[in-house]
Amino acid sequence: MGWSLLALFALVTLGFAYETCLSREKNPYLFFGTKTSYIVASRGGPNHTKVHEVPACEPVAFWMLYRHESYEPEEDEIRRLQVLNDFKKDVVSNYRRSIYNKTNHRICLPDYQLIETWEWKPPRHNLTFAGDTSSEEFIDALKLAQNWRQRYPNLFTENRRNYKFKYMMDDRRSTTSLGGLTRGLFNKSVVYDGFLSEHDNKLLRPHKFCEAWTKSVGDTPIQLRLFEAKQEYKEMIRNVSLRLGFNYDISADAIRIIFDMCRYDKAWDISKVSPWCAVFTRDDLRRLEYAEDLETYYNYGHGNELNAKVGCVFVKDMMNFFTSHVGNEPPQKPQVMLQFTEAPALLLTLAAMGAHKDPVHLEGHNYHSAPMQARKWSSSKMAPFNANLAAVLYRCRLNGSYQHKVLLLLNEKPISLDWCTSGVCEWSQFVIKLGEVANSCDLEACNETHIGRNVAILVVAVAFIFLAAVVAALWCRSILNRGKISK
């Protein structure tokens, strides 16, 4: 009897040794692609209070591209995420039927209880609020604006003529983001009378007006499909399935839904444990992050040459704004240009600038390679919620004359480019490198009709060359034949 109890105790102890308690992870992985919290993406950089200090220089103009805060799921996302109601019931059933005892991957009781008590709650999950920005990230926008005002008090003044806002009036996220930033700048809610503003959707969403681009990103990138077909990705699905008590692999779409709920939860409240994040290990989350990096790399980044041609629109806007200041005595009005857009536009702009470019392409087969583990293209760090690309023009007194420099910042950290590694760029280099991008920027080049016309011209030209070659060959042949006859 004693031996039996001892054996039972040993089996139970052995069984519990294989449990995973991921909700108790002391240093959880929080990089979730384009749904990463700004707090996570912006941490670990240089001293933010000093980054703006450029010796012997004073700031004269500020340009920023700003992505909206986190938001409630869109209407179609809400319908997808609602399946977690039934999925949760299956997980609870698996646990109660002791299916977990048949696997060494089962989650621990605290993790199970988090899932068991999870509910789909209004108003956050209500269709009425679909797509609205969240109050948490509104506060982040407010704090960000306060940071900029503290660093550049001579630019961020009370004078309304000192600002120009570009935002989409038909987009609630843009208008809410504008509200958060202006509240932080002026310490109060403001009426926008007296401010310069533009509402050009073609400028703020250039990719939406490029037929060729829309067509090129219509399908899932091939490299993403290759990665999802890899054994390591399938193993991730298998491990999550076993962890939740399923004796079969749940679908890749189910994994994606769980991941989306996880990252929404953490974006809304970074300090709160998400029951759906607790089903993933650190390695699982890194693979899911890489999958999104593959998608953004080919849809908005360096994986498609067309992306840079579309993203040049904002580079051109930046160059025009700064050129007007360099060519005139300061101060010119407005000194602050703020533009509100979405993650795709920000990533397209970075691609046009040549930023975060890796020496090798991101591909489905090279996830474990050293370059990919240290890759520069990271959607989590480049385009989290509240992402911001800022450029600050400085006027510098050097050797008795005035020169200009530009400080480039992404999420308040200096951007390293091939020709400007410190983030502080000489104006002469800035004009050569990004001026070339701006001068060659023409969205007409990516329209289907324009491309179709060029293709038609090319086809006619090739046909003409081919016909000319045939005629020449026949002529030469006739000459040779005459020569043979004369002999």
Image: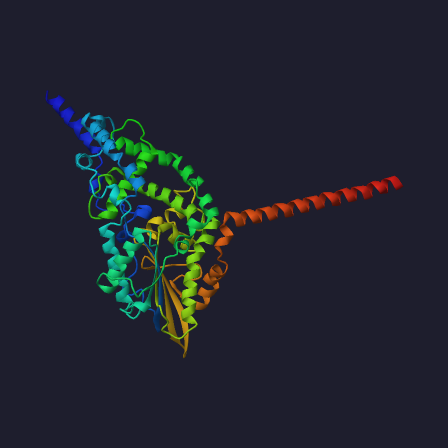
Which of the two residues, 68 or 14, is positioned nearer the viewer here?
68
Residue at the extreme front = 193
Percent position of residue 143, x then y: 24, 59
Mark count = 0
Q: Residue at x 20, y 33 (%)?
A: 17
The quarter holding residue 179 reads bottom left
- Image quadrant occupied by the N terminus: top left
The quarter holding residue 3 reads top left
Percent position of residue 142, x then y: 24, 58
Is 274 on the left or on the right of 55, as rendered?
A: left
- Image quadrant occupied by the C terminus: top right
Is 168 on the left or on the right of 214, as rendered?
A: left
For the rendered model, the colour scheme is: rainbow
Q: Residue at x 25, y 55 (%)?
A: 140
- Camera sees residue 487: no
Percent position of residue 71, x then y: 27, 48
- Camera sees residue 431: yes
Residue at the extreme top = 1
The quarter holding residue 251 reads top left
Residue at the extreme bottom = 400
Which of the two residues, 214 or 90, is positioned nearer the viewer here?
214
